[in-house]
Amino acid sequence: MTNQNVIVSDRKPILGLKTITVSVSNSSLFSSSPPTAYFTFPRRKFLKLHEDNLGAAKIASWVDSMRDSSPTRLRSSSHDSVSDNDDKTSWIVRFPSALSMFDEIVNAAKGKTIVMFLDYDGTLSPIVEDPDKAYITHEMRDVVKDVALNFPTAIVTGRSIDKVRSFVKLNEIYYAGSHGMDIESPSNENTYGERKQGVLFQPARDFIPMIEKVVKILEEKTKWIPGAMVENNKFCLSVHFRRVDEKRWAALAEQVKSVLVDYPTLKLTQGRKVLEIRPTIKWDKGQALNFLLKSLGFENSEDVLPVYIGDDRTDEDAFKVLRERGQGFGILVSKVPKDTNASYSLQDPSQVSEFLKRLVEWNRKTVGEE
Ligand SMILES: [Mg+2]
């Protein structure tokens, strides 16, 4: 199995560095072969991009957008959320409920293998104040297990695999943690009765020590902000705003920005009440979706219908990939109209559960009829 890995590396001390080297590798994912090509471009240009990413205006827009995506704050002034009734009506026409479009979805699945991709936070579990307590219900776990017994199923999340597995507790599924930078196959029981999950892909392994270091610095720098929480997701990290007073959001974002200035090979992205720091490798949930389809033998197949359900900006990368492939459907979980590359919508995790149950029932019936 081969794939192209692109790694941006800052190979010299930051001060005095004139260039940034980007290595591109066609080597096997499982070998340690050296990269096949290097591109070098001016450090100034690279750092300019990095600084733009951390600019004051950008920080302000993140904080604004986090406020807007909060379920209790539906502001009409937002770039990507609108509360006006007319807009809401026209939005639901453009992105109809996956429940009301169920027949269309299963018609498209006839003769094809559905592959199910599920985000975790806000999709299978509600967004809660304490991210360590984002549990799924027993009912949702049973539904996801049923889905996994009927279709190849993957959980694709920004969390570390260990963390999300501790919530989901299912062996039958693929896990793509750290925004797809850590992918494991369903676990198998060996002859000694031990369960082993197989590592399929870890494109950002070299970044683990850097992530650990930044987690420590951020914990130190944010400890004076009540409720601030830094989560180490192994290949990336999250700074949670959920329990921080809104008045302190800008201050917290400033602290995150001040640390990141020294790490040009890391980038910031924004989610629902969270800022996330990730390596600047070209890898996201969309790439993880493509990788998993390829691993399942569907790279160039017409006989597959991928369905991706997610609620966050980072899920848009996967929705976009589905549009580019011209295959399957993205389903956005949101009560609020948002700009999206998804095709359909669901309002909350309870509707996700209902949709998944109907899909399992439909599949059992279809298989029974064959
Ligand atoms: Mg989510």
Image (cartoon, grey):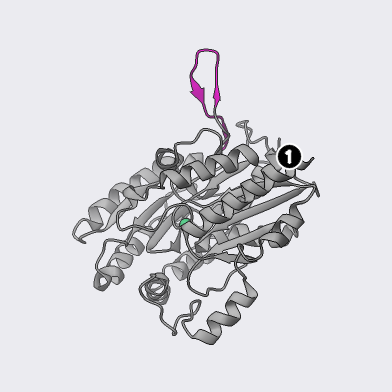
| Vertical side of 277 occupied by 153: above or below | above
Which quadrant would residue 243 be assigned to in this image?
bottom left
- What amino acid does circle 1 point to? Gly
Q: Which residue is mark 1?
A: 368
Cβ of disc 1 within 8 Å of ligand 1?
no
Q: Looking at this view, is 296 or 228 the one in front?
A: 296
Residue 190 drawn at (x, y percent): 55, 17
Is 315 or 46 nearer to us in this picture? 315
Q: Residue at x 63, y 60 (%)?
A: 330
- Asked whether, in this view, residue 28 is left or right of residue 63, the answer is right
Task: Where is residue 93? Give x, y as percent.
Answer: 63, 77
Residue 224 placement (x, y as % from top left):
18, 59
| Above/below status of 186 relative to 138 | above
Which residue lies at the image location 53% right of the left edge and 29% below the top edge?
A: 197
What segment is highlighted magenta in the picture? 188-202
Q: Is residue 128 visible?
A: yes
